[in-house]
Image: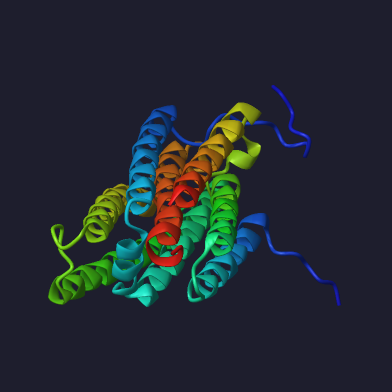
Amino acid sequence: MSIAVSGEPMAELPGDFAIWIFIFAELLVFAVLFAAYAFARSTDVVLFNTAQRALNRGYGLINTLLLLTSGYFVTRACHAIKRGRAQVCARWLSAALGLGAGFLGLKLLEFHQDAQQGITLSSNLFDMFYLCLTFFHFMHVVMGMAILTVITIKAYAGGYSAREHTGVETGAAYWHMVDLVWIILFALIYVIH
Amino acid sequence: MRLTLPAPHTASWLALLGLTLLSFKLGARAGGQALMLAVLALTLFKGHLVVSHFMGLRHARPAWRLLMSGYLLTVGAIVAAAYFSA
C-alpha cells in the first residue's frame, strides 16, 4: 500500500467506483453546457447582463449556502459512520436532506416567480440557458435526494458500520458532485456579469 | 486556554460560506474582466475545497486529484476565454 505525505494510507476513490464513472460523465456534460453558455453570452453581452439583472440574486445566494451546508452535513455523516456511529450518521444525513428540500422549495418558488415575470424558455437566449441549466441541475438534486433518502433509511436501520459503509460514501460522492456543479452555476448565472 | 483548530472539513465549510458571500458582494459591483477573473478564481478555489475535503480526494491517488483539478482549470479557462472574446 502506498503512503501519502501526511502519513495516512492513500486510498482509492471513496465509494463504489461505478459512481465515479457516472460523476465524470455528468461533469463532462455540465462542462459542455457551461462552455455553451459562456460562448453564447459573448455573442450578446448586453442582453445577457440585462436579463441577468432580472433574476433574484438573493435566492441564488441562499440556495448556494443551503447546498454547501448540506454537503458539509453529508461529510459529517461519512465521518460518523467511519467511527461506527450509525445513528449519528443517519441524523446528519436527515439534516442534509432537510437542506436539500429547502433548496428545491426555494428553487420552485424562484421558477414560479420567474414565470410570473415573463422569464420563459423563449423570452430570450439568457433566459433559455438559465432555465435549462438550473432545471437540469434541479433534476440532479432530486436524484441526489432520492439516493440520500435510501441511504438514510438504511443507516437508521443499522445497515452500515465502520467496516462496511460503501453505500454512504457512494451517495455522498454524488451529492458533492451536485454541489460542485452548483458552485460553478451560481458564479456564471448569478454573479459574473 | 488551549485553542483547537477546527477539522479540515469544518474549516473548508466555513471557508466555502465566506467565499460565497465574498463572491456575492463582488458581483454586486459593476462588471468587468477583473471582476470576472476574481469571481472565477474564487469559484475554482471553492471547487477545489469541495473536491479535496468533501469528496475526500485529498487522500486519493494523485492521478484522481489531477483529473479533478484539470477539470476545474479547463472549465475556468474556457469560461475566461469566452468572456475575454466578448
Q: Compared with residue B14, is residue A5 higher up or lower down, i.e. above or below?
A: above
Q: Nearer the viewer, residue A125 or A139?
A: A125
Residue A62 is left or right of residue A119, and the answer is right
Q: Compared with residue A117, is residue A190 higher up or lower down, i.e. above or below?
A: above
How far across and how far down the image is residue B78, in percent? Answer: 47, 42
The quadrant of the image that shows the N terminus of chain B is: bottom right
Instruction: Check the image and name the residue furthest to the top.
Output: A1
Q: Identify the image quadrant of residue B16.
A: bottom right
Residue A96 is left or right of residue A149, and the answer is right
What residue is at 13 percent from the left and 76 percent from the top?
Answer: A116
Q: Compared with residue B63, is residue A47 higher up or lower down, i.e. above or below?
A: below
How far across and how far down the image is residue B60, in percent? Answer: 61, 33
Q: Identify the image quadrant of residue A109.
A: bottom left
Q: Nearer the viewer, residue A32 or A158?
A: A32
Q: Nearer the viewer, residue B80 or A167?
A: B80
Instruction: Check the image and name the residue furthest to the right.
Output: B1
Residue A88 visible at all: no
How far across and how far down the image is residue B42, in percent? Answer: 58, 58
What residue is at 15 percent from the left and 63 percent from the top?
Answer: A123
